[in-house]
Image (cartoon, rainbow, N blue to C red):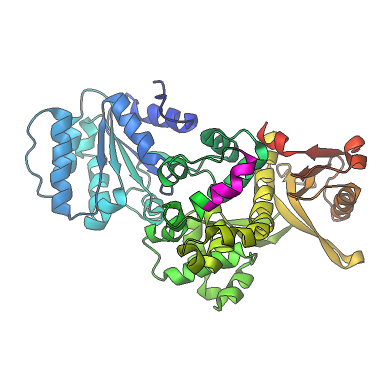
Amino acid sequence: MRKPQHVFDREREWAGLVSFASDASPGARLGVVSGRRRQGKSYLLQALASSMGGIYFPALEVTEAVALRLFADELVRFTGAPVPPFRDWIDAIPYLFGAVRDRPVPVVLDEFPYLVKASPELPSIIQRELGPGGSGAGSMARVLLCGSAMSVMGGLLSGTAPLRGRAGLEMLVRPFDYRQAARFWGIGDPRLAVQVHAVVGGTPAYRNEFVRGDIPAGPADFDDWVIRSVLNAEVPLFREARYLLAEETEIRDPSLYHSVLAAVADGNTTSGGIAGYVGRKSNEIAHPLRVLEDSHLLVKERDLFRPNRSHYRVAEPLITFYQAIMVREWARLERGDAATVWRGSRARFLSQVVGPHVEVLCREYALDADPAAGEVGSGVVPDPANRTQIEVDVAVLAPADHGRPRRVLSLGEVKWDRLMGAEHVARLRRARDLLTAKGYDTRDTVLTCCSGAGFTAELGAEPGSDVRLITLDDLYA
């Protein structure tokens, strides 16, 4: 089934949903679709239900009795016949399965966490009806449970949860990657695309719903766009970073979680550094870190050259922008003085927001560009002779081959607003030599320089056979 034209990209997700929903084998099937809010899950599932003549039921934060009445109304629309009132979900789920018998039909229960909050037993009821002797045996319903509360959705199929082992589809709808986001925003200039992505990331809803389709007209319009659309207290995007945490049910102390995110955005990326920043012991922030990881707001990444060490980064660019630029000037921004705030914050934006963000984009690029890549990340190479450490922004390792030294495919450094020259290559060569001494296989290691400002004439004219230069144009090619 062809994807509707109004659904942008999402080719892989659409193919997976259609394959699941059109499965003609007998018996009801269960799928789970999750992802942070604003990523277009509901839009995608509505399109699926509409295209396949299915059922789309968007749950509300209401009591069980009201939810059952609304669900019965949806079944009336689907069947075109009267539906008896349901006393509870023990009545409703078997009726649903009995109403879908002749062909595969997608049945979307959107915002499923709302239903679970009012009826905690609902997953168990679905599990029973899908099991041996349940009403699902004779049904062709393809039930899709969808939700944005990642702690709830992640727990549906884990551990001893009733639905563990029952799902035939488990799909996570992620933000658009940086190339998709540039196309979605209609931005062709790579430098502008990087800066916009450093603010709003790849969340689809931010373009149309949150800034009402306001797109920078070009690189020269970026500053004005930030002032009128991001730092404008009358635009919904202004407070969005504060609301992202409110959607997670496990968060009981929002101030602590905001403080953890602020710590990471400010450059404190280890658990010890985060604990020191927020004034708590390390064991006291272990749970918030886990919840933020489960919510896809934090990412934990290991040091590729020191496997026992890891660091955190904020996964949502808007939160990084909020913590680095907006928090400290919140009162002034609320008074409408966005232009003054931005003039005083733009340098910090380039160094604390865009610079680290480009490193992430270059790692994404490296993963796509090298089909032999097994692992892409960053790492620190100790240099005892010089009593220093060499930070490698982009490291690409081949898949581990038991009994053989780990192959290092490339080592890279990233600069956003600085010309890169021979000294950067020399530092990478030193890192390569040190890794060779530690037992890594570096015979074919390529040294990559990724710059948003360009390269010196010397390096650009003759980079060397083992050196690769990457521009912003390359990132978006």
Name which quarter of the figure residue 323 lies in. bottom right
**Looking at the image, which is closer to me, 122 or 341?**
341
**Looking at the image, which is closer to me, 193 or 406?**
193
Asked if the magenta segment contains residue 220, the reply would be yes
Is 295 placed left or right of 99 in the picture? right
Looking at the figure, which quarter contains the C terminus? top right
Magenta span of residues: 218-227
Taking 445 as reference, is 76 above or below it?
above
Name which quarter of the figure residue 368 lies in. top right
Residue 162 placed where, x, y %? Answer: 31, 51
- At x 48%, y 44%, the residue is 203
Residue 443 placed where, x, y %? Answer: 87, 41
Looking at the figure, which quarter contains the N terminus? top left
- At x 82%, y 47%, the residue is 419
- At x 61%, y 76%, the residue is 276
Asked if the magenta segment contains residue 243, the reply would be no
**Looking at the image, which is closer to me, 154 or 175?**
175
Residue 272 placed where, x, y %? Answer: 62, 72
